[in-house]
Image (cartoon, grey):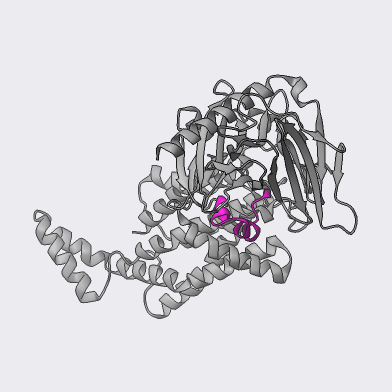
Amino acid sequence: MEQQRNLLFILLLCAAMFLFWDWNSDKDNALKEAENAAVASLNQEINDKSDISNTVTIKSDNLELTVNLKGGDVIDAKLLKIKQYQDKDDPFHLLMTNNKFLYQAQSGLAGKDGIDNQFRPEFTAAQKEFLLKDGENTVVANLVYEKDGVTYTKKYSIDKDSYVVNVSYDIQNNSEKDLNLCFYGQLKQTCDDSYLKNDTGFGMVASAYRGTAYSTDDTRYEKATLDDINDDLKLNIATKNGWVAMIQHYFVSSWIGSGDDNGNVIYSSPAEKNTAAIIGIRTNNISIKAGENKTIGSKLWLGPKEQDALSQVAKNLDLTVDYGWLWFISIPLFKILNFIHSIVNNWGFAIILLTLVVRGVMFPLTKAQYTSMAKMRLLQPKLMEIKEKFKDDRQKIGAETMKLYKAEKVNPLGGCLPLLIQMPIFIALYWTLMESTELRQSSFILWITDLSVKDPYFVLPILYGVSMFLLQKMSPTPITDPIQRKVFMAMPFIFTFMFCTFPAGLTLYWLISNCFTIFQQVIIFRSLEKRGLSMKKA
């Protein structure tokens, strides 16, 4: 039974590692118009470098945006309070447009009278830079375009200490005809991320999941990779509330639907000859009568995966912190971790204390597990007698074995069931640490200056290997086959090598977990010996 426990633990840990390495006809016609307008014109735009030579800068305390005056799209976004690299002052580069990689937040007006249907409009701005001034709480940039008696003012507004960009069109219809159009916001990104890995240092860790996600009235959270979209996954989902997003490790960009009674449609499409992908959300068509003024728009999130802030921006947007299918365990674990951090003010010590809390809560299950295994070990001689006595009658062996279990009040699954209960919690804790943007560039002690990357001197992995070796020595194993025994004894070295690539925060968690397990086993084994239930071999 203990051999099965160890093998199960190893398989689940390997699985965690692989996860670590590796989110009506009028409406249909309107959606087609929006897609045709957005995709056709936007794809044409980026191929002409002269189209992005005329730009304006919008800068708050959190964000610095570069907006292309042709179309009014955000073609570059920097997160000013977050470093690209810990040892440099360069801000984190979220959106970008260059010869190797494209990642933009695009928006416009489509539909029957949309100004983005064939060619992107050329906006004008009163100045080249819009900066958040001292003593002000909001920076606002107005981009103006006039056509056929209609004035379109595209407005960007960013509040202080916020990653939310309010994007709206103020439409003054001074013409003699009614207008019928819709607002769309979409995210466009190159599918090949080799540039990010090679040139910006995102690397393997940042590629935990990179792709799109969306939420509707009927679906809280759904993912679709960029390749899925380029393989003709064409979303066409009507929803009152909802959002679309592109996510990567620790960061997310998202367009949020209007949420009003007019409703929205979520859509997707390949772009740039299937080298880029688009996911977007648009309003249903609205009517603006002659002489009428109307404002339509959306919110755009550009920033880190800060769960509390995301949950306030849109329902379910905090689910872009992708904990996988164990999210219902991971979310409470993060809240506990965050609470502990608010007291100790160090994410490394918070991880240690959280690990101790979790292992402490699991102590009764661990004790029950070892007690059951000890009882099973004491029954081995009697079980062997039954097998020898009824060796030609399997049915009789089974009946007598169950009779013995019942007489001795032993559950044969007692050593396995506690482990099966514990493993989802441990895996959820793994993903909690994997997805917490708060660990990025957070120091622990001494040489550990970033808990989200590997230990530069491999001290934590080596200590983990030592702790695993000690656990093996303390835990008797029934493995008698010499080859299997050698493989089993080699596991500390194998896992030490594996953990050399793990983020320091995760390695710290496993190290403390092992140390606490050693402490637990000392207490449990002494208790069992007093009761005559030794874990040692007979």
Answer whether residue 473 is visible to the viewer in this image: no
Residue at x-position 74% and y-position 66%: 345
Which quarter of the picture shows residue 416? bottom left
| In this picture, residue 6 sits left or right of residue 397 | right
Most foreground residue, 167 or 63: 167
| Residue 242: image location, x then y, percent | 52, 50
| Residue 215: image location, x then y, percent | 50, 49
Residue at x-position 45% and y-position 32%: 233
Which quarter of the picture shows residue 154? top right
Task: Quarter of the image for the C terminus: give it.
Answer: bottom left
Most foreground residue, 175 or 244: 175
| In this picture, residue 388 sits left or right of residue 51 | left
Up-down: is 270 above or below 323? above
Up-down: is 272 above or below 200? above
Most foreground residue, 523 or 320: 320
| Residue 395: image location, x then y, percent | 10, 58
- Residue 64 painted magenta: no
Q: Which residues are magenta?
A: 303-320
